[in-house]
Image: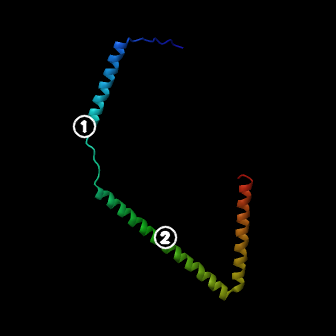
């Protein structure tokens, strides 16, 4: 390992270095204050908020519309199978119940076993 030389400064020399460091820091801060700072108007922020609210509202309406259309199609399919083919309806109900029980059981076992 290389020996490093330590220079012991007397208090007068140390004070000069501290004053020099402080003056350089102040010069740097003064240079930073010369740069112009742009802050947008309040109106700009309000417009951004309104635009975002409109975008979220349109997305919500679109998602709800898709949800309702899919729900109506599924309900119509179930009603048709109930009245036109009751055997298929009963089979689907039993199969769905078994699937949900099996899926829930396997997920619960994975949690219990730490997986």
| Among the 4 quarters of the image, the one containing residue 6 | top left
Please name the residue shown 69% across and 82% down the image. 89
Seen as rendered, the residue at the extreme bottom is 83
Q: Nearer the viewer, mark 1 or mark 2?
A: 1
* Coloring applied to the structure: rainbow
Asked whether 100 or 35 is in front, the reply is: 35
As drawn, the label of residue 34 is 1
Tag count: 2
Circle 1: is it few (<14), some (14-19), or many (20+) Cα within 10 Å? few
Q: Earlier in the sequence, mark 1 or mark 2?
A: 1
Question: Residue 44 appears at what percent x and percent y?
Answer: 30, 57
Q: Is residue 110 above or below residue 74?
A: above
Q: Secondary structure at mark 2?
A: helix
User: What's the residue at 73%, 71% (across, down)?
Assistant: 98
Residue 54 x %, y %: 38, 66
**Residue found at x 75% / y 53%:** 113
Residue 6 numbered mark, or none: none
Q: Secondary structure at mark 1?
A: helix
Q: Which residue is pictured at 38% across the width and 11% down the height?
A: 10
Dividing the picture into quarters, in which one does residue 90 lie? Answer: bottom right
Furthest toward the front, the residue is 11
Residue 11 location, x and y as percent? 37, 13
| Residue at mark 1 to residue at mark 2: CA–CA distance | 50 Å
In the image shown, does 30 or 75 lie closer to the viewer? Answer: 30
Quadrant containing the N terminus is top right
Instruction: Say few, some or many: other residues with alpha carbon within 10 Å of mark 2 (under 14 / 14 to 19 / 20 or more).
Output: few
Residue under label 2:
63
CB of mark 1 within 8 Å of CB of mark 2?
no
Residue 49 location, x and y as percent?
36, 61
């Amino acid at each position: 390992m290389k020996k490093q030389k330590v220079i012991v400064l007397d208090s007068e020399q140390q004070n000069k270095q501290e004053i020099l460091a402080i003056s350089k820091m102040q010069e740097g801060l003064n240079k930073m204050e010369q740069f112009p700072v742009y802050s947008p108007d309040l109106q700009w922020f309000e417009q951004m908020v309104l635009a975002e609210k409109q975008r979220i509202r349109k997305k919500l309406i679109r998602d709800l519309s898709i949800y309702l259309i899919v729900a109506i199609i599924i309900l119509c399919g179930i009603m048709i199978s109930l009245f036109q083919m009751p055997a298929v309806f009963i089979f689907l109900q039993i199969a769905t119940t078994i699937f949900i029980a099996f899926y829930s059981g396997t997920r619960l076992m994975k949690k219990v076993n730490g997986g």
